[in-house]
Amino acid sequence: MTSLALLQLVSPALPVGAFSYSEGLEVLIQAGSIADEQAIQAWLEAELQRGAVRLEAAALRPLAEALVGWSTQADAAAKARLIDLDGWLMATREAAELRAQQRQMGMSLLQLMSDMGYDLPEPVVLNWPAAWAWAAVGLSVPAGDMVEGYLYGWVANQLSASVRLLPLGPSRAQVLQQRLLPLIASQAQLLLAVDPQQLWSSGVGAGIAQLAHAELYSRLFRS
């Protein structure tokens, strides 16, 4: 059942609104910085190796451990670690749109988990990575699969946005997703054992694009 639970979490049908966000990709494509399949592949590879998504993926294991401590032992220190790390991750996001995205998707996933019978010990606002960690805890997804699934889902959502913004068909997007699987797997294995607060993001271009998105004259996406 664990593998089926992971499939549910990475499903595009998960009702968290991920399809409505491009995380700055729309800006880069409108500016011509990304214009074809090769460019989007290079961009995704760079973000997986050096971008902010690495920090989030590395934070999943300590977030899950804190959630287990809080939910099973009523450990106040575990709750404090959870809130602190969740807040730290939010502070790494420069753009207000990205912070709103993290908040909306996180709360939507927490609501879904509640509907499925997995309530937190008490109501609390958590952002997307922490909510993902709670979903993995509730559905008994192993730590390695949790991190792999998070990165896989992020890539899938970026490719979904690319299909709507670039001359890139769904079949080519699937080829790209498959091509990135080895990198997703290797990064997940690496990040599973890394302290997220010892990492940094060098995705300056992504941060600038995400900030600029709020001022686009016309746009399809919310970030």
Image: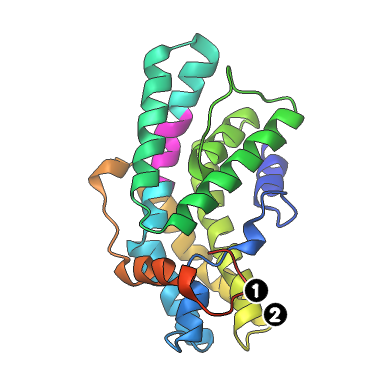
Q: Is residue 113 above or below residue 173?
A: above
* Residue at numbered disc 2: 171
| In the image: residue 56, left or right of residue 167 | left
Instruction: Measuring from the top left, give residue 99's x and y in whole percent.
Output: 46, 51
Q: Amino acid at mark 2?
A: Ser
Q: Are marks 2 and 1 in contact (CB under 8 Å)?
A: yes
The residue closer to the viewer here, 81 or 7, is 81
Question: Which secondary structure is most common in the magenta stretch?
Answer: helix
- As displayed, is residue 221 above or below residue 76? below
Where is residue 132, by image quadrant?
top right
Quadrant where the N terminus lies? top right
- Count residues near mark 1 (Cα–Cα under 10 Å), then give few for <14, some for 14-19, many for 20+: some
> Is 58 in the magenta?
yes
The answer to whether 214 is drawn above or below residue 18 in the figure is below
Quadrant housing residue 154: bottom right
Q: Where are the magenta residues, as a range?
A: 57-64
Q: Secondary structure at mark 2?
A: helix
Q: Residue at x 50, y 22 (%)?
A: 68
For residue 174, which numbered disc appears in the image?
1
> How many marks do you count on the picture?
2
Question: Can residue 141 be spotted in the picture?
Answer: no
Graded by Cα atoms within 10 Å as few (under 14), some (14 to 19) or many (20 or more), the crowding at tag 2 reads few
Quadrant in which residue 145 is drawn: top right
User: At 51% from the left edge and 69% from the top edge, which residue is drawn?
Assistant: 180
Closer-to-camera residue (103/198): 103
Q: Is residue 139 left or right of residue 43?
A: right
